Structures are given as C-alpha cells and as structure tokens.
Image (tube, rainbow, N blue to C red):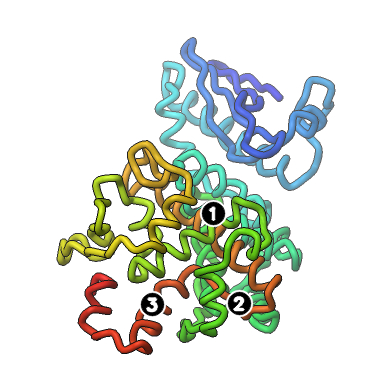
Amino acid sequence: MIRYTKTTIIATNLDGRERKGNNERTVRIRIQTRGKGRYISTRVPMTPDQYELSFGQKSKKPRNGQKENLILAEFEHIYNIIRKLEDTQEKAPSYEQIMNEVKTKTYPDEKINIKMLYDVYLQYIQEKKKLSYLGITKNTMKKLEDTKLLYKNTDTISSEDINKWAEELKKQGKKTSTITTYTQNIKTVFNYGVKKHLLKTNPLTDIKVYQRVHVKKEINEETLKFLLTANEQEVGLKHKYFQYLQYFRLSFWAGGANIIDILNWTYDNKDKNELTFIRRKTKDKTNKLIKIPLSEQITEAINILPKGKNHMFPILDGIEPYSEKEKYLTNNLKQNINKTLKLISQKEGFEKITFSYARHMYPTIMARIGTNLKMISAGMGH
C-alpha cells in the first residue's frame, strides 16, 4: 500500500527479519521525506501470504480484519500528521517532526484483541532480551487461549472476566501463587499497551490477588532416600534426566544450596576437603563464607554432571552475572529439574516433589538425627 502527499511518500512493507518461531514478520510503514526513507513499526505481525492478500500489489484494497484495521489506523494517522505539517510550514516535514507527532497516537481500543497486545509485548521482551519473562508470558497466553479469552477485544474485557477465569484455574488445582503470576502478567501486558498508546486505559486494575498459601515442604524419608541414592538403572529415565537429578542431590548435600549458587561454583570453590562459597542471596548483607565438607555424595554428583570451562558446570560459562540471560538459564534448569522429579514421582508413585524440597528437607532431616541447630544454620548460610 502506498500514498503520496505534496512532499512525502508513505508505504507499507514487511520487516526483513523473521520473528522467532514462526513465519510472521512485523508490518512497517516507510516514510520517505527530504530524500531519506525511514521506518515506523506498527508492531503488528503478519505472514508474507497474509500481507500479500491484504496490502500486496494484487490486492485492490486492504482486507477488513483486526490486524488490517490496526495497520490502516496507524497509516491514516501518519498521513494526516504529514498533511497537517505541510499546511503549517514551507519546507517538507522532517522524519523527527513526524515521529514526535506519531508518539501521541492512541489506537481505538475496540480494534485490538488481547492476542495482539501479547504479540506486541512478546516482540518487546525478545528485542530487549528479557528472556526470563518469556516462559510465564507464553504460559499465560496458553491458559487464556484455552478459554478463548485470548481473542477477546480489549474494549469488552473486564477484571470480572479475569477473576472468573482465575477461579476456574483454582478449581482445576492450580496453586494460588501460579494463578497470581498469570494475573500479574496480564496486568503487565495491558500496562505496556497503555504505555505504547495501544490502549487509552488499563481495564484490569481490579484483578483479584490471591494470598500466598504456605505449604510445608516435607516428603517421605523413603522417597528422599530413593532420590538421593538411586543409580541410573533404578531411576529408569534417559541419562539427561539422571543428570538433572544430580542438582537436587547437590542442593541437599550442600546444606540446601540454591541453584544459582550451585551454578556459580567455580573450580576455585573446591579443594580436597571442602566446598566454599558465598550465597548470592545474602552476599550484599553478610558476605559470609559458607564451608561444606566435600562428601562422597557431593563428589559423586559432581562427577556425573558435565564439566564447564570456568564454572564447575557449563550452564553459566561466559554469562554475565545478574543478567537476564543468567536468570533465564537458571530458571530453565529449575524447570528441567522439576520435570525430572515429576517423571520420577509418576513412575515410582511418589507425591509431587519439586527442587525446593531439597533445600527445605535438609534442616528437617538434620534435626531428626540430632544435629546441632547452629551447625544446621551454618550449613544453610543463615
């Protein structure tokens, strides 16, 4: 699609870069003024076939669809801005002048559904490499899609709709903490829509927030014994899952160490007799050095896991500390560990177990066998 003013050419095309995971590309508006051509992204994704049918050379006029209407609204807005600038000055408007006016654009809410908002937000977090947000954002989209809320127009959605959806998830057995994570993600996406002038207001400010229910993390001692001692044949899963299980064992035998601490161990943290490290969580407060005896169990788990170049384990090799990439890789590993524990639980008939049980069961077991509380506290870095 192309249109001319007295001084400027405006046209649509597709971004040359393909969006990750599908054949869609973002539709752009090209503005050629004062001999230079630049682009404004509409943030609306389309496949090349969809674009050709809607805006291609063989298309007599744009198709009437939600995405098409959103693009046309942006196109008309830019066209009107340029015409207004031309009427008020002698020179052709500059790209900077046009952009300053474009930023004031507010889309009609009724032209946008929730999936469009999510597509825009996903593109943003991928461009900014906020990888830790990807998983929960995609999971929330999937849950919304299951009830078709994902395709509801933003002008017809209300907090009551989301609260009813959350109650259904609760009846299905979802944890209140998980449901709250979903609803907070929805509010974040809508707030981003307001920030980017896709929406006038966020209609979901009154979403119910569930109180976190504390569940005592304790498992049967026979179950724990199996998780800590079973060999690969007894576990009966692929080798990669047996490797993930070793992180659970390391956490327990290292006094309930957090996964981020384990992944940041380097070869300097280990000598013949003990492991020494500073907990990431309390580093800025106490900077206390934790010393863990290098037991037979810890040594065995370390030997089973793949070796890193700089770190003892390779996952965070070359990754900047405290970065989004570090957070993403750490969370991804925890998901794989929890998947492994779920598979073992299903196979052996255990109750549900997660990685966090390793940390919380350590003081329980040590107290049962009569270990001094000061020693337990020191082992956990408290």
Question: Identity of the amino acid at label 2?
Answer: Lys
Depth order, front residue of 19/208:
19
Q: Quadrant of the C terminus?
A: bottom left
Q: Residue 132 location in percent, x, y?
A: 47, 52
Callout 1 crowding tier (Cα within 10 Å): few <14, some 14–19, many ≥20: some
252 horizontally vs 73: left or right: left
Q: Residue 235 location in percent, x, y?
A: 63, 64
Mark 3 or mark 2: which is in front?
3
Q: Residue at x 64, y 65 (%)?
A: 234
Residue highlighted by disc 3: 362
Q: Residue at x 81, y 37 (%)?
A: 63
Question: Identity of the amino acid at label 3?
Answer: Tyr
**Which is nearer the N-term, disc 3 or disc 1?**
1
Look at the image and tell me whether residue 281 can be seen.
yes
**Which is nearer the N-term, disc 2 or disc 1?**
1
Marks counted in the figure total: 3
Residue highlighted by disc 2: 352
100 horizontally vs 234: left or right: left
Quadrant housing residue 376: bottom left
Question: Identity of the amino acid at label 1?
Answer: Gln
Label ID, residue 243: 1
| Residues at marks 3 and 1, CA–CA distance in whole angstroms | 20 Å
Q: Quadrant of the N terminus?
A: top right
142 horizontally vs 269: left or right: right
